[in-house]
Image: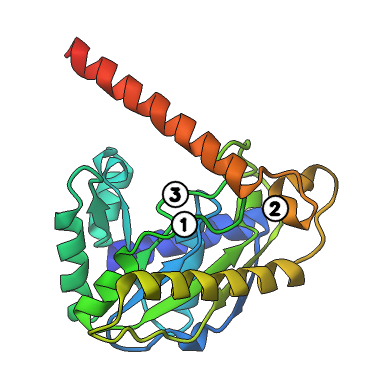
Amino acid sequence: MEPIYSGVINFARGVFAVQGLKFERTGSENIPRTGGAVIAMNHIGYFDFSYAGYSARDVGRLVRFMAKKDVFDHPVSGPLMRGMKHIPVDRSAGAGAYRAAVDALRSGELIGVFPETTISRSFELRDFKSGAVRMAQEAGVPVIPLIIWGSQRVWTKGQPRNMRRPKVPIRLDVGPPIHIAADADVDGETSALRARMETMLHAVQEAYEPLTGDDLKYLPARLGGTAPTLEEANAMDAEEAKEKAAKRAAKRRIE
């Protein structure tokens, strides 16, 4: 038992109960009870990592998430993230995080990864980076696809937080393990992983309670919602990245 991780989990469960969140989980048995695996997840809300851990807890496991270094630099979240043995990712120098993740996988850990790398404003799957597949292949462990839906209704990019009493269902669906052969083409396997997860996502979306009125902003345009299309969301993300780069450059000039 890990006291810091257990303490955070118990606190989070209390918060979720007060919020009235209703978790629906299927496929948790697909997460191995022992040994390493990459948990590949879609990303639609800021709390996806905390909700996704429920599926692993169903089989008595903990997930070590790969997260932005900024989270580890925060005076409050930083000590907790390190205490839970999550892995910081510096996007300007990602080799160290990659190596740490592979080592952890080989030692039998579950490593949580968001192949999209950032929240999808469209609530559709963005393009996948190949890191999840590469890590699994190098460490000789399976990739476990996990789909989350409903978390965008609590807090997502571009929308106000709904933290007090959202009382929304959050669905977690875990797919069967995907084994990556040592000589497999990484790009091809990454495309196959995305296709598998897209099928899972569509099934979960279709089975979820109907969204109407103001909640249509949390529904993909493909399903009649008012969220931006994937193309529109990609353009928004590109503009945001451009603005952030300009701010970083201006800060460096001042320093």
Q: Secondary structure at mark 1?
A: loop
Mark number displayed over residue 220: 2
Closer to the chain start, of discs 1 and 2, is 1
Marked residue nearer the N-terminal end (1 or 3) = 3
Neighbour tally class for label 2: few under 14, some 14-19, many 20 plus, Cα within 10 Å: some
Residue identified by numbered label 1: 127
Quote the CA–CA distance across marks 1 and 3.
10 Å
Name the outermost residue toward the right: 213
Q: Is residue 154 visible?
A: no
Could you give the CA–CA distance between mark 1 and mark 2, rounded to whole angstroms?
Answer: 16 Å
- Circle 2 SS class: loop
User: What amino acid type is highlighted by mark number 1?
Assistant: Asp
**Which residue does the numbered mark 3 point to in the structure image?**
118
> Picture coordinates of residue 204 (x, y %)?
67, 71
Asked if residue 240 can be seen in this view, the reply is yes
223 sits left or right of 154 in the view: right
Q: Position of residue 65 (x, y in %)?
A: 33, 62
Quadrant of the image containing the C terminus:
top left
- Identify which residue is drawn at 61% across, 74% down: 199
* Residue 68 drawn at (x, y percent): 31, 47
Residue at position x 44%, y 70% in the image: 191
Picture quarter with the N terminus: bottom left
Label 2 amino acid?
Pro
Above or below, 233 relative to 29: above
Few, some or many C-alpha atoms within 10 Å of disc 3 (few <14, some 14-19, many ≥20)?
some
Outermost residue, top side: 254
Q: Who's the residue at 53% across and 72% down the image?
A: 195
Mark 2 / mark 3, whichever is N-terminal: 3
Looking at this view, is 179 or 101 the one in front? 179
